Image: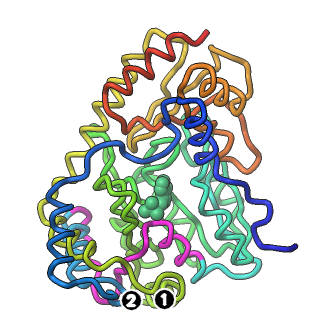
Amino acid sequence: MSAKLLNIKESIVMQMSKLAAEHGAIDLAQGFPELNTSDELINLVTKYMLANNNQYATLEGVLELRQAISTVIEELYSKKYNPQTEITITAGATEAIYSAITAFVDEDNEVIIFEPAYDTYSPVVRLNGGKPIYVKLQHPDYVINWEQVKMHVTARTRMIIINTPHTPTGRLLTHDDFEMLSKIVANSNIVVLSDEVYEHLVFPENTFCSISMFPKLAERSIVVNSFGKMLNITGWKVGYTLAPENLTKEIRKIHRFVTASINKPVQYALAEYLNNKSYLELAELYSNKRNLFTELIEDTKFKVLDSESTFFLLLDYSKVSTMKDSEFANHLTTKYGVACVPMSEFYHQKEDNKVLRLCFARPDEVLKEVALRLTKVV
Ligand SMILES: Cc1ncc(COP(=O)(O)O)c(C=O)c1O
């Protein structure tokens, strides 16, 4: 049988989670916040359901939500996206990424992807006949070498995908990075896709730059975002795109045939909830958790790599074992009861730097137990 994604295996996160379940291990592989969802938000969804908002929403999304997003983005980044023509509500960032890539990437187009990379970008590029061109972020700092990027840009480059705050490393792109990117794409047809789903999970001592802050870049860029991480509602699957009208028009054409319409009562609830801005407290909460975990394992041979954001951290185990990271992740899960993701899985050539990714968006008690288990690893 022939099929387009025959060679794609089950995601490593799912594999590790299953292994965790089989062995009763603590699952730090899955990237979801194991924290409470706001009662206020849940009550708002009920309110809008009871008010009879239970049929299809319009294709581009509930206007009130698009207006609320527009206001938040303008307050944060001084960039006004027109709610009518430049904002589209999607089924999470996953659909936003799919619709954005599908709208613009065609047969034999090249798309620059930085590795380690979130696992959705490359398969979607390939589904559209495009060719992923990989540029590596150098371990252990994971910064972009723009000279290398320049060398990979050709007349066939259609898109550059950036991700800031970055998963799995938690690093942020700086003002200078955006200046370099801006120079590289000037006078080209390149569209930039900026995945900013961890926008509100930046630790207080760091500064986040959105691509929307850079007018020259914003006019050729699509921002994708998600309420999942921001509000502890990954299961609700609501996200959005921000893009100039000419790009938004094309994204909406794909969106129409993928989902056409997103959960309506949830959109109304989010619109009302966004006005109180309590999501901004999350960064501090995660920063405290990261600090707690780092302190707890200070006396072990594991080393937490520097990070500035997200609810993931990278653990260097090179002083603990010489096993390959995939083997070591299995070993840690089955023998010590801690499941995480081997970093090599975020590279198409499975580069192994003896690093694991852990999701620390878990109750403090769970993090203490994980640290205790890690101290026993020899
Ligand atoms: C970098 C990145 N982009 C996109 C997504 C997908 O977001 P959503 O769950 O809203 O589809 C995720 C989810 O883990 C992610 O980590």
75 or 263: which is nearer to us? 263
The mark found on residue 256 in the picture is 1
Label 2 to label 1, Cα distance in Å? 7 Å
Q: Residue at x 27, y 72 (%)?
A: 266
- Whether label 2 touches label 1, CB < 8 Å: yes
Whether residue 59 is situated above or below residue 123 in the rendered picture: below
Quarter of the image where one finds residue 15 = top right
Whether residue 361 is situated above or below residue 123 in the rendered picture: above
264 or 76: which is nearer to us? 264
Quarter of the image where one finds residue 44 = bottom left
Q: Amino acid at mark 1?
A: Arg
Q: Residue at x 16, y 53 (%)?
A: 278
Left or right, residue 279 beside residue 210: left
Q: Amino acid at mark 2?
A: Leu
Q: Earlier in the sequence, mark 2 or mark 1?
A: 2
Magenta-colored stretch includes residue 97: yes
Question: Residues in magenta?
Answer: 76-101
Q: Secondary structure at mark 2?
A: loop
- x and y, in percent, of residue 374 in the image: 51, 17
Q: Which residue is mark 2?
A: 59
